[in-house]
Structures are given as structure tokens and as C-alpha cells.
Image (spheres, rainbow, N blue to C red):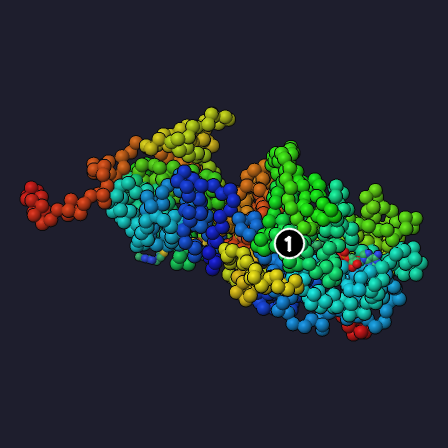
């Protein structure tokens, strides 16, 4: 962390987006994370993504649980709504928020401990429910905030800072989310901004639950020799399976040049994701093939990244529940709470 | 690209824009920090080491450092460097015990210096501590040259001038006043070991138009200012026209107002963007209600019965493209009445007293052939400096010429090669004090430049010697020192420590850092986070980083030296280190250093 705030210096010739804001307008408070933490780098990618999407800050809700990762919503888009909830319980709060106001742009930041240990059940159900949100797991293999105990994503055989070896199996949020019926599942790396920003943008625009697992090294407790979540290990074993470009609705897709392999997925709002595959055989819409591929790479110790699975047609929560198009939060209080007599009438009809 | 060689002192020197811009390389950020700590005397001595006349220059320096100042590139006004120099001089204590000790035992070498302007004084300042015997010959009855009799006392008080000149003369310089040198040959025959010519550029340019010699009321600016300074001229007519719009013109118009003129017009041939005068001098003149008339080209002095009536001007029109005049037209004529005219259209060298058969070569404009490094003329042992060397410049250049000429004179007197000069030196020292603590004020202060307070207009003209600028008060000083960005606290990169976490890139408030694959300069520049706007600013490229082989690139242009990159870096790959740059002076060529001399002295 730093003690002085990043100063605001408006330099000549700095860009503004479609709604007239600068990148700096999407920043948040002073980070109190350790210097060099991968989480800060993801924060910077989120700032860039929202800036480039020209998202009005007040249309965003940012949510989190508990952990170093869960502190980060305080460090981006300070003009957004926010809720820093209880450990592992962010999905419930997000569900409530989105149930009340379906028009919000929902971004949630969680950690591997927050989502795969204490909050594993909540995580599973929000994926199943296909809540319209971007669910980022800042994955460092440890409980950073409580001083580096192994988390549920720590790989068997990997070493903690003081040398003890992890003996339990790890939970991979990507294959888990696909198995749970996730509609958008991706993995990125905090050290690869070029890949991460389009994944965040696509996740924000995806209608449904976009799970984005981001390998995010904990410099303080898990960046040593023997760790499988360090900067060095991730870089050595880095394996992008699909390169993702995000193209907003208004823009033309440039004529294909070299990569004949690109496929385009059109999203509900008209944006498109262009997927260029590193492995020719890879098909991000073939669920069983993807699962097979991931398992194969996992045994080889590779860190597979990219937009790994997508199904734009799965209905999200409001469609499943057939709720009204108008957000409940826009309704008058008397509509939402019509009084004891109305309740009695309703109950009578149910007897 | 190859790794940038930051061991070459020029790299970090160039980052300290003000120091790079200062002809004498004054360590500006260092003295500003000393002022911030209330160490005015120390700040004064840091200045004196480089520029010799801090009190004088703190008022009238041409300040090439200020347009260079980094603040100016981030959409703000530059730090008031010159004003702060004056603060150091105004609040310092006695410095006599800090001045160099002059050896009683002389080294037997005698140096003649012609003219007692700042150039000669700077030479004496550097040579006296080494045991040289310096003799100055000055045509006037007082020392100081143009600083005394052309720069008006309302800008530079005589007391300030006397004090700083005396620091040098009191080193034991022998000075002969009212002693113009009329023959170089005769001087050379006197057997000095070396001769330094610091006679300035004493001839004001003429404007030979009809009517020029038909009246007494047309004056040459620099001669006229001299007469005013010496009390030979005490008044001027009500309506005065100043021809030319350089700094001399500004002094002439403001002096006219103090001699009784009521309506003073400065006549400029071209539009404002082509004015030679410094902005602050123009502002001060306009504040005093001097009218600046543009696009008027002098045509004729109108004189009737020996009395000046006014001047006729051609009204000009220009086509300007991108700051360059592409076409000129005369659209008419205008007569402007006046009682006096002062010509302020430039100066040139003149050496009527140097015989042309001595081996000192001159070009067709009567300028001596002077070596730009050694300041030696084509005659061995004869050196030039200040305005006499390359035409009119300013005080700070004259001082730097003096430093360099002193080195050459020392080498010459010891039979050494004049080109065998010591290299500039660089020392770096970390300014890290703790996790988040630096021994400099790193937090960016957005305060605007403080404005100098002036004596009220009503008071100003009562006395010609009344200094107009009041100097900075404590509040102004306290704010202004914090505006300095500490450009000498450098970002120093240790390539092998970086783990490419991007923390520094993200925290940098001005996006100066980028990690990219190595390649050709064009490709690297094209992929920078922020566009490279100033091609002259240094670009740092590291070695291949150990995890990916990419390189760390820093465009120094917008760095505000906030230290956040170093604070954010988990591995201390960036550190904030003070660059201490050394620019050798004559004393550095002497083996037994001043310490020993002190004992001996
Ligand atoms: C009106 C005016 C205003 C200026 N304002 C500024 C300013 O604000 N800031 C700034 O930095 N610069 C200013 N300058 C420029 C600055 O004054 C000169 O660049 C500087 O003084 C040059 O110093 P010097 O030592 O080379 O020569 P000078 O200062 O010209 O000194 C030369 C000395 O040599 C003497 N001399 C000449 N010939 C002989 C001889 N044959 N024998 C003996 N002695 C001789 C002269 O009497 C004089 O004392 C100004 C100039 C003018 C004309
Ligand atoms: C109910 C509850 N149980 C335990 C804790 C202690 N605790 C705080 S953060 C944390 C783990 C956070 O790990 P992760 O989500 O991976 O975040 P990181 O710090 O690694 O980013 C734990 C166990 C808590 N705050 N609340
Ligand atoms: S403990 Fe680890 S996860 Fe937490 S801030 Fe520090 S580096 Fe980041
Ligand atoms: S000191 Fe570092 S963080 Fe601050 S502006 Fe310079 S490069 Fe950027
Ligand atoms: S913060 Fe340090 S380790 Fe991280 S990229 Fe910058 S220099 Fe490298
Ligand atoms: Mg964690």
C-alpha cells in the first residue's frame, strides 16, 4: 500500500470516453493491499474495462464477501453502488440486489477462499440460478487476508511459504462452474492485461452469470518457489486456449487477416466476442469436449486461459422466474407493500 | 533496443530539466528543498557554487530553467525558480566564512582580465582560490558592467550588486578603474601569463533612417540607460517612442516613465508572438501602462526646425503559418508624434582596441574566433567570455563562460592540453527512509504558481531606484517550494528484481511506465501507455526482464517524481535516488584540494 494518494493530474491530450469521462474517473479509493498484489492489477483492468465500455458509474453495483480480494471494490468505480457483505455470502446479497433492480450492471469480486471454501454453496447456486452478473474470483491459492493458509484452490503438492505441502485435492472454479451449468466461464491472469480486459468486458455484457477465474498471485504469502499460483509458475505454465476480442455493438469487426479460425459470438446487447483459438480443435460451445480438454491440461499442470465455455442462450434468473421487465425498485412503495388487507386476500387465495 | 546507459551523467541530468536548461547547471531542486527546510544560507551556497551571483540572478536572471520546468509540461505554470533563488539570497546569513580561502602563497601566475563585468568576475572567482593573481582593467569607475549601468536599479538594487561583486573583489583581486585598455598589443607586452577579454558587446545598433542625425532627441538605448545610471540624464520628454521590443526596450520604456514621460509606446515591427522580450518583462511594462504597438515598421524621423515631431511608420500585415511569417505587406502609413525616441534594436561586439595583426582572428562581422569549449581565441593564452565571445547573451551564460575560461586558463598556465577536460560526474543515493517514507516531499501539490508582489503603481515612480519587486513572503515561499517536483530524485530501475506484477504501471499517475516486448524504437514507442509527446525527453529501456524477457520502458516526459512506482513495487525494482551531478570547475583540477589549502591558508 502507499500512504499518499495517487495524485490527479490532468495531462494534455488524455482520452475521454463516450460519456465524457476519463479513465481516472473510474478509479476508486487508495488501495491498502500489499505492493505488487495481483488483485490491484485486476482492479486496474476493471477500471479500464468500464472506461472503455463507457458505463455510467451510477448504473453499476459492486459486491464482495471477505478477503483481500473482497476489499478491492473499494478501489474501483467510486461512483458506483456497493455492498461489502459477509464471508462467502456475497451471492445471496447480489441475488437480492438484482432481484430488486434488474437494470443494474452487477460486478462481484470474491476470492478463492470466499467462493470455494466458506462460500462454496452460495457460489454453486448463483451459477445455477444464472444471475445476471460478472462474478470474478481473484484466485491466489491462499487466504491472503488471514496470513496465507491454503485455500480450496491450492493444488495438491504445492508448497506453502514455510514449506508445508498441500495434501488435499483442489477445487477448480472453472470446471466446477461448467459442471454446475454455468453460461459463461473464463480464466485470466492478473499479469496479462491484454487478455483480461476483453474478458471483463464480455463478462459484463453477458446476460447471465459470467464466472471469471483470475489467477492473481499473492506476493506476500504465495509467490515463492514451489507455489503453483506464483507469477513465475503461472508464466511458465501459461496456456491461452482462446484469444478473446470484445467488439462493442457500434463497431465493425475488422476484416479477418491471418486467423481463419476465429468464431464470433453475438451477445444479447449486440456486442460480439471474437474468439481466436490457439488450439484448432477447441470449441468453447461443446461442454463435454471443454471438460475433457480442461481435465487433460490440468494433469499436465497447464494454466489454461481464455473464454473457455459460453452458452448465450441459457435463460438468466429473471427470465426463469418470469418477472416483470420493469425493475421492482422503480415501483411505488404502495405497489410493493400493498398492506395487510391485500396480504390477507392473497393468502386466502392460497388456502 | 539496448539497455539505456544511465551511468552516463547526461541521462539523469536531462531529467532535471531546470538544471539541464541552466547554462551553469545550478542544482535547482536541491536548493529549493533547502529553502523548504529554512536552510537559506545553504541554499545560497548551492547557488553560488554554480552561478556565483544568486542575489543578482534571483532578480534579473533570464531564467532559461523556467520554460524548461517539468511543471510546465503537465498543464501548469513552471515553478518560480528565480524568485526562490532570491528568497535564498534575501534570508541568508553572513557567508564570509563559507567563501573559499585565498592562499597567501600565490602560485606566481598573473592573469589580466579586461572589463569588470560578470564574465571577468566569474573567472576571478574561480582562479583566486587557486593562488592566481588576477588584475582587472575596467574602463568605468565602478565594477559590474551592464549589470550595473544598463539593468536599471528598480530591477536590481545597487546594494545587492555591490555585495556580491565585493565577495569576489575581496578575494584580493587587483582592479584598475577608469582604465580602458586601448591596445591589446600593449597589454600583451606587459607579460601576463594569460589574458581574458570580458568587455561585453558594447555597441548599440543604429537605425539609419531619414532625420536620424537632425535632432538630439534620438538615443541609443544602452548608451542612454548608462547615462541614466550614472546620473548624466535625469529627464525625458512627455511622449516617448521606444523602437524594438526586446528586454532592452522594456528597461528603456520603464526608465522613461521614471524620468517623467507620460505616454510611452513600444513600437514593434511584428505581432506579439515574435517579441524577443521575456514574458515577465512585458507584463511588468504593461502593468506600468506602457503601450505596445504592433505591426509598425519605422520609416522616418520627422524633424522640423531641429525639433523632433514624431516618427512615420509603415503599417505592416503578415501572413503567418505555424508560427512562421510566409508573406509581408505594407498596408499604409502612420505618423506618431513624440518628443524622444530610444532605439533598442540590439547590440554588437566591437573591438577597436585589438590590433588585427596579433594573431587574434575575427570573422566578417567583427566577431572573434573563439573555441566553444575552451574559450581560447586563435592566439594562445588569450581567452574570451561573456558577451564579448559570441555576442550578447545574458548574465548566466557569461558566468558559465567564466567557469570554463578559468579551467582553460589554469590548464594553459600549467602547460596542459586545454581539451583535456574532466568529465561530468554522477552519484546516486537512495532517498528511501522506510516502507512509505522518503527523505523528500513526494506528495504532488497541485498549487498554482505564486505571484510576485509589486510596489503599488503610485509609489513606483517617485524614486528611480525604488525596487519594484518585493520578494516572496513566508506564505508564498512555503507554497512555491512544494510545487517543485524534485526531478533530481530519480527513478532508478534494477532490472533483475522486477517480477512484472504491473503495480508500478498502474499506480503511475501520468502513465510513464510500460512493459512491452523488446523491439525497434518505433515499435516500442508505438506501444507506450501514454503517447510520447516530447521526442527530446529521455526514454529509458531496461534489459530483458527475467520472467518474460519483455522490457520496462519509461518515458521521462511526464514523470512527477511522486515515488509511487517505488512505493508500490514489491521487490524494490524501482528506487528513488537523488542524482548528485558534478560539473568540474577550475578547483577540481587542483590536486591538493581546498581542505588542505584551508590548513595552509
Ligand atoms: C538593457 C539591458 C538589460 C539587460 N537585462 C538583463 C537581465 O535582466 N538579465 C540578464 O541575465 N542579462 C541582461 N542583460 C544582458 C547582460 O547584461 C549581459 O549579457 C552581461 O552583462 C554580459 O556580461 P559581460 O561580463 O560579458 O559584459 P558586460 O557586462 O558588458 O561588462 C563588460 C565590462 O567591460 C568594460 N569594458 C569594455 N571595454 C573595455 C575596455 N576596452 N577596457 C576596459 N574595460 C572595458 C565595460 O565597461 C564593462 O564594465 C541586459 C542587457 C541590456 C543591454
Ligand atoms: C465467517 C468468517 N469466517 C472466517 C473469517 C476469516 N477470514 C477472513 S478472510 C478469509 C479468507 C479469505 O480468502 P480469499 O477469499 O481467498 O481472499 P484473499 O485474501 O486470498 O484474497 C477468512 C477465512 C471471516 N472473516 N468470517
Ligand atoms: S496478503 Fe496477499 S492477497 Fe492479501 S493483499 Fe497481500 S499480496 Fe494481496
Ligand atoms: S515517480 Fe514513478 S509513479 Fe511517480 S510519476 Fe514518476 S514513474 Fe510515475
Ligand atoms: S512494481 Fe516492481 S516488480 Fe512490479 S512491474 Fe513494477 S518494477 Fe516490476
Ligand atoms: Mg485467496
- Pick the quarter of the image with the C terminus of chain A: top left
Residue at the image point whose x is 7% and y is 44% from the top: A345
- State the residue in front, B48 or B144: B144
Tally of marks: 1
> Could one spot residue A10 in this view of the protein?
yes
Q: Quadrant of residue A87?
A: bottom left
**Residue B348, position as x, y percentages in the image:** 77, 48
Up the image or down, B573 lies above or below B597; here it is above
**Residue B533, position as x, y percentages in the image:** 58, 42
**Residue B179, position as x, y percentages in the image:** 85, 62
Q: Is mark 1 within 8 Å of ligand 1?
A: no
Q: Residues within 10 Å of mark 1 (few under 14, many from 20)?
A: some
**Residue A315, position as x, y percentages in the image:** 27, 34
> Mark 1: which secondary structure?
loop
On screen, residue A333 versus residue A228, left or right, reads left
Q: Quadrant of residue A267?
A: top left
Q: Quadrant of ligand 3?
A: bottom left
On screen, residue B599 versus residue B70, left or right, reads right
Q: Which residue is mark 1?
A: B238
Residue at the image point whose x is 72% and y is 56% from the top: B225
- State the residue in front, B6 or B451: B451
Up the image or down, A230 lies above or below B163; here it is above
Residue at the image point whose x is 55% and y is 44% from the top: B515
Residue at the image point whose x is 92% and y is 61% from the top: B190
- State the residue in front, B98 or B440: B98
Q: Quadrant of residue A211?
A: top left
Amino acid at each position: 500500500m502507499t500512504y499518499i494518494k495517487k495524485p490527479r493530474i490532468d495531462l494534455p491530450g488524455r482520452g475521454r470516453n463516450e460519456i465524457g469521462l476519463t479513465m481516472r474517473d473510474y478509479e476508486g479509493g487508495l488501495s491498502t493491499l500489499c505492493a505488487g498484489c495481483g488483485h490491484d492489477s485486476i482492479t486496474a483492468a476493471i477500471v479500464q474495462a468500464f472506461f472503455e465500455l463507457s458505463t455510467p458509474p451510477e448504473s453499476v453495483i459492486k459486491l464482495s464477501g471477505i478477503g483481500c480480494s473482497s476489499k478491492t471494490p473499494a478501489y474501483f468505480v467510486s461512483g458506483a453502488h456497493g455492498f461489502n457483505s459477509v464471508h462467502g455470502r456475497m451471492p445471496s446479497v447480489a441475488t437480492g440486489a438484482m432481484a430488486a433492480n434488474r437494470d443494474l450492471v452487477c460486478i462481484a469480486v470474491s476470492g478463492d477462499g470466499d467462493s470455494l471454501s466458506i462460500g462454496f454453496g452460495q457460489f454453486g447456486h448463483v451459477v445455477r440460478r444464472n444471475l445476471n452478473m460478472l462474478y470474478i474470483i481473484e484466485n491466489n491459492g491462499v487466504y491472503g487476508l488471514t496470513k496465507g493458509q491454503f485455500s480450496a484452490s491450492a493444488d495438491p503438492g504445492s508448497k506453502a511459504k514455510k514449506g508445508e505441502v498441500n495434501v488435499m485435492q483442489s477445487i477448480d472454479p472453472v470446471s466446477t462452474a461448467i459442471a454446475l451449468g454455468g453460461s459463461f466461464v473464463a480464466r485470466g491472469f492478473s499479469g496479462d492485461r491484454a487478455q483480461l480486459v476483453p474478458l471483463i468486458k464480455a463478462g459484463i455484457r453477458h446476460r447471465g452469470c459470467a464466472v471469471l477465474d483470475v489467477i492473481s498471485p499473492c506476493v506476500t504469502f504465495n509467490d515463492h518457489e514451489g507455489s503453483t499460483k506464483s507469477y513465475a509458475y503461472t508464466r511458465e505454465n501459461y496456456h491461452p486456449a482462446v484469444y478473446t476480442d470484445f467488439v462493442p455493438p457500434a463497431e465493425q469487426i475488422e476484416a479477418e487477416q491471418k486467423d481463419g479460425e476465429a468464431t464470433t459470438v453475438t451477445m444479447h446487447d449486440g456486442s460480439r466476442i471474437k474468439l481466436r483459438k490457439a488450439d484448432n480443435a477447441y470449441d468453447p460451445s461443446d461442454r463435454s469436449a471443454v471438460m475433457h480438454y480442461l481435465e487433460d491440461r490440468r494433469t499436465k499442470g497447464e494454466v489454461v486461459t481464455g473464454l473457455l465455455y459460453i452458452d448465450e442462450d441459457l435463460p438468466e434468473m429473471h427470465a426463469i422466474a418470469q418477472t416483470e421487465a420493469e425493475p421492482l425498485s422503480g415501483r411505488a412503495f404502495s405497489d410493493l407493500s400493498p398492506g395487510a388487507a391485500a396480504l390477507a386476500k392473497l393468502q386466502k387465495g392460497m388456502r | 533496443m539496448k539497455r539505456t546507459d544511465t551511468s552516463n551523467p547526461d541521462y539523469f541530468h536531462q531529467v532535471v530539466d531546470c538544471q539541464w536548461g541552466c547554462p551553469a547547471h545550478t542544482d535547482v531542486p536541491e536548493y529549493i528543498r533547502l529553502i523548504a527546510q529554512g536552510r537559506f544560507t545553504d541554499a545560497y551556497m548551492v547557488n553560488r557554487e554554480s552561478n556565483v551571483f544568486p542575489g543578482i540572478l534571483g532578480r534579473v536572471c533570464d531564467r532559461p530553467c523556467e520554460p524548461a520546468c517539468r511543471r510546465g509540461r503537465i498543464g501548469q505554470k513552471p515553478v518560480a525558480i528565480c524568485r526562490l533563488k532570491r528568497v535564498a539570497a534575501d534570508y541568508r546569513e553572513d557567508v564570509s566564512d563559507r567563501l573559499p580561502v585565498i592562499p597567501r602563497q600565490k602560485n606566481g601566475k598573473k592573469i589580466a582580465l579586461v572589463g569588470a563585468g560578470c564574465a571577468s568576475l566569474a573567472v576571478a572567482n574561480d582562479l583566486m582560490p587557486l593562488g592566481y593573481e588576477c588584475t582587472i582593467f575596467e574602463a568605468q569607475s565602478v565594477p559590474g558592467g551592464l549589470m550595473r549601468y544598463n539593468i536599471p536599479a528598480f530591477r536590481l538594487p545597487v546594494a545587492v550588486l555591490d555585495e556580491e561583486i565585493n565577495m569576489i573583489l575581496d578575494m584580493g583581486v587587483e582592479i584598475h578603474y577608469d582604465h580602458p585598455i586601448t591596445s591589446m598589443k600593449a597589454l600583451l607586452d606587459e607579460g601576463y601569463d594569460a589574458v581574458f577579454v570580458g568587455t561585453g558587446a558594447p555597441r548599440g545598433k543604429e537605425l539609419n533612417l531619414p532625420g536620424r542625425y537632425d535632432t538630439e532627441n534620438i538615443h541609443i538605448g544602452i548608451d542612454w540607460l548608462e547615462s541614466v545610471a550614472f546620473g548624466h540624464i535625469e529627464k525625458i520628454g512627455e511622449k516617448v517612442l521606444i523602437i524594438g521590443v526586446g528586454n532592452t526596450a522594456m528597461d528603456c520604456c520603464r526608465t522613461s516613465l521614471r524620468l517623467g514621460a507620460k505616454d510611452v509606446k513600444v513600437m514593434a515591427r511584428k505581432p506579439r508572438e515574435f517579441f524577443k522580450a521575456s514574458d515577465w518583462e512585458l507584463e511588468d511594462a504593461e502593468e506600468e501602462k506602457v503601450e505596445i504597438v504592433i505591426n509598425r515598421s519605422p520609416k522616418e524621423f520627422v524633424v522640423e526646425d531641429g525639433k523632433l515631431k514624431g516618427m512615420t511608420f509603415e503599417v505592416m500585415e503578415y501572413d503567418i503559418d505555424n508560427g512562421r511569417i510566409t508573406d509581408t505587406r505594407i498596408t499604409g502609413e502612420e505618423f506618431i508624434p513624440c518628443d524622444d525616441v530610444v532605439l533598442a534594436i540590439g547590440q554588437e561586439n566591437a573591438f577597436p582596441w585589438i590590433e588585427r595583426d596579433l594573431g587574434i582572428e575575427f570573422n566578417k562581422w567583427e566577431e572573434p574566433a573563439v573555441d566553444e569549449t575552451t574559450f581560447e581565441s586563435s592566439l594562445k593564452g588569450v581567452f574570451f567570455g561573456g558577451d564579448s565571445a559570441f555576442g550578447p547573451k545574458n548574465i548566466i551564460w557569461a558566468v558559465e563562460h567564466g567557469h570554463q575560461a578559468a579551467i582553460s586558463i589554469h590548464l594553459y598556465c600549467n602547460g596542459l592540453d586545454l581539451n583535456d577536460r574532466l568529465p561530468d560526474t554522477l552519484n546516486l543515493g537512495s532517498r528511501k527512509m522506510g516502507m512509505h517514507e522518503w527523505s523528500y516531499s513526494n506528495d504532488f501539490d497541485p498549487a498554482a504558481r505564486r505571484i510576485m508582489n509589486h510596489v503599488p503603481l503610485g509609489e513606483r515612480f517617485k524614486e528611480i531606484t525604488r525596487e519594484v519587486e518585493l520578494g516572496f513572503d513566508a506564505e508564498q515561499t512555503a507554497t512555491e517550494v512544494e510545487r517543485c517536483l524534485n526531478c533530481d530524485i530519480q527513478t532508478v530501475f534494477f532490472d533483475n528484481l522486477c517480477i512484472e506484477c504491473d503495480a508500478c504501471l498502474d499506480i503511475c499517475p501520468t502513465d510513464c511506465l510500460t512493459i512491452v516486448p523488446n523491439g525497434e524504437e518505433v515499435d516500442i514507442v508505438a506501444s507506450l501507455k501514454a503517447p510520447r509527446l516530447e521526442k527530446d525527453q529521455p526514454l529509458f529501456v531496461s534489459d530483458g526482464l527475467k520472467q518474460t524477457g519483455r522490457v520496462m520502458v519509461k518515458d521521462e516526459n511526464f514523470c512527477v517524481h511522486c515515488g509511487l512506482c517505488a512505493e508500490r513495487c514489491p521487490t524494490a525494482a524501482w528506487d528513488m535516488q537523488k542524482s548528485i551531478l558534478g560539473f568540474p570547475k577550475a578547483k577540481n583540477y587542483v590536486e591538493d584540494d581546498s581542505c588542505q589549502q584551508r590548513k595552509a591558508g
